[in-house]
């Protein structure tokens, strides 16, 4: 059975043109005028784009004494409803746990996925076993990215020596290191100071993680990556200081990527000063929302190319879960949702306002990350041979975002009340119509793991400054006796 998407305008990261798209066996088999097939999807007035890829989600994540509320079923259903057809979650080994054992747990959870998915592996501790297993993860398990948390002291955080060792191993294996860049030591100290002074509400979360904490860590991670001869991907870049470090590195010839979140682009710090505790706590995430100045910096980065990817860090907790932190903001589970809203919000506040073009929209929601993850052009492309992960985007379709109509399992939405114009008419996951003009037709278990080969460019990365790549031993004629 073939499907044809007819009368639409194809929009890719670099082209806009009118053509029909024919799908067979889950793949695009033909692109051209006047195609016919068994099923016809009418794309009149719509843009036919590669489905979104969200490279930063935490589904059923064990975190801060609980689990994030969206699992692979509700999370990927939300993704498809918003035009996203692939997600990448983070496999998090417990301290001392084998990476391969942790991966089994994540494989199990993901069997319920409605769309394709992949994993990043987190390096949460360091030792010979991690060093050895990283090779198996890359060569046998199809994972070419390793995440490092510079925050969450006493839990997920790794130190500089561990990061340097892991980044160096990534460089050997052709893998890409990722960092959550916040100075965890400073955050912990500031949290304690705020608590001691009686600041225990959600606003203290923002005070404890100022932009400098992120800027310093971003810069440190970049320099460590450069010394290790590895490229670097900085997740949830939220402020000018971090963006500035990325811009500088890129202009010095380093392969460094930055990923703003849709939340940081569109919501600001005033959310933490709401009189309603629940309202503010529901928006607690790390890094926190920032000022308009930081938002302008992120938008400029997307337009100029110094930031490459828009993600969500979807990590949704219910109001009840957030209330664990009443009286101590440090216990509010960190994380917000966004999977269903990323594409409509970015279109409405980015394309419709003229901040980014339609082609840039495709680049930052899909194609750029497909290339970074080394799954392009199987994903992130409208090309013959590519997976038919497609969104038929109706720029005239509108809605008001509301928790009451969302797919996510939680009881609120951080974008509640926002008006969006630009929504999927159809979302196709490997040719299957999962969203059909508002009707949800997802199929639990349809999603498949996307294996990712090591990236040749990554294994060839060298230190920009070449200082540490070739140590030269000095031959001396005489060595003095050691001192007392
Ligand atoms: N971002 C956040 O607050 N929660 C999810 C875990 C992480 O990515 O830091
Ligand atoms: Zn995250």
Image: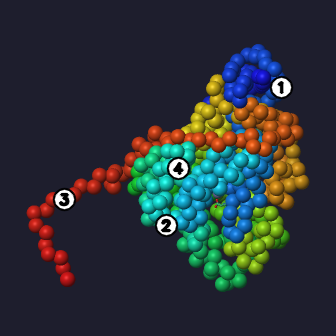
| Nearer to us: label 1 or label 4 | 4
For ligand 1, tell me if the residue under mark 3 lies within 8 Å.
Answer: no
Residue at point 65%, 56% (across, down):
105
Q: Looking at the image, tell me whether mark 1 or mark 4 is earlier in sequence order.
A: 1
Mark 1 surroundings: few (<14), some (14-19) or many (≥20) residues within 10 A: some
Q: Quadrant of residue 150?
A: bottom right
Residue furthest to the right in view is 404
| Nearer to us: label 3 or label 4 | 4
Circle 4 is placed at which residue position?
Answer: 137
Q: Is residue 137 left or right of residue 432?
A: left
Residue at point 60%, 32% (across, down):
377
**Disc assigned to residue 42:** 1
**Disc assigned to residue 63:** none
Circle 2 is placed at which residue position?
Answer: 159
- Mark 1 and mark 2: span between their CA atoms? 53 Å
Residue at point 36%, 51% (across, down):
465
């Amino acid at each position: 059975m073939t499907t044809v998407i007819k009368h639409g305008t194809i929009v890719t990261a670099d082209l806009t043109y009118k053509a029909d798209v024919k799908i067979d066996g889950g793949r695009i088999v033909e692109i051209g005028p006047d195609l016919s097939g068994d099923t016809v999807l009418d794309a009149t007035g719509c843009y036919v784009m590669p489905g979104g890829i969200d490279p930063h989600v935490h589904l059923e994540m064990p975190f801060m004494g609980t689990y994030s509320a969206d699992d692979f079923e509700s999370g990927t259903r939300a993704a498809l409803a918003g035009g996203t057809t692939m997600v990448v979650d983070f496999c998090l080994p417990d301290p001392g746990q084998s990476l391969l054992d942790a991966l089994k747990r994540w494989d199990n959870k993901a069997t319920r996925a409605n769309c394709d998915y992949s994993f990043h592996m987190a390096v949460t501790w360091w030792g010979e076993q991690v060093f050895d297993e990283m090779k198996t993860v890359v060569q046998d398990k199809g994972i070419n990215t390793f995440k490092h948390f510079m925050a969450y002291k006493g839990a997920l955080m790794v130190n500089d020596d561990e990061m340097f060792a892991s980044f160096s191993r990534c460089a050997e294996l052709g893998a890409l290191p990722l960092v959550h860049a916040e100075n965890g030591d400073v955050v912990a100290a500031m949290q304690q100071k705020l608590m001691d002074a009686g600041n225990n509400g959600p606003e203290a979360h923002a005070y404890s993680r100022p932009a400098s904490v992120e800027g310093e860590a971003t810069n440190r991670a970049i320099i460590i990556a450069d010394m290790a001869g590895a490229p670097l991907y900085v997740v949830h870049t939220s402020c000018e200081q971090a963006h500035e470090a990325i811009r500088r590195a890129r202009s010095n010839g380093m392969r460094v990527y930055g990923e703003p979140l849709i939340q940081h682009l569109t919501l600001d710090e005033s959310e933490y000063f709401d009189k309603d505790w629940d309202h503010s706590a529901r928006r607690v995430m790390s890094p926190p929302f920032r000022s308009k100045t930081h938002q302008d910096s992120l938008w400029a980065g997307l337009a100029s190319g110094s930031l490459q990817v828009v993600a969500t860090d979807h990590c949704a907790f219910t109001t009840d879960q957030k209330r664990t932190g009443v009286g101590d903001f440090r216990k509010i589970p960190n994380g917000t949702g966004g999977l269903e809203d990323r594409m409509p919000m970015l279109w409405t506040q980015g394309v419709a306002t003229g901040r980014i073009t339609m082609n840039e929209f495709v680049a930052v929601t899909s194609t750029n990350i497909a290339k970074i993850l080394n799954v392009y052009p199987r994903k992130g492309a409208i090309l013959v041979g590519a997976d038919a992960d497609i969104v038929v985007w109706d720029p005239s379709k509108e809605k008001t975002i509301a928790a009451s109509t969302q797919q996510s399992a939680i009881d609120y939405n951080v974008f509640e009340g926002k008006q969006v114009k630009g929504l999927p008419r159809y979302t196709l996951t490997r040719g299957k119509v999962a969203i059909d003009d508002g009707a949800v037709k997802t199929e639990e278990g349809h999603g498949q793991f996307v294996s990712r080969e090591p990236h040749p460019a990554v294994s060839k990365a060298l230190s920009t400054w070449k200082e540490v790549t070739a140590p030269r031993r000095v031959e001396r004629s005489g060595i003095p006796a050691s001192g007392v």
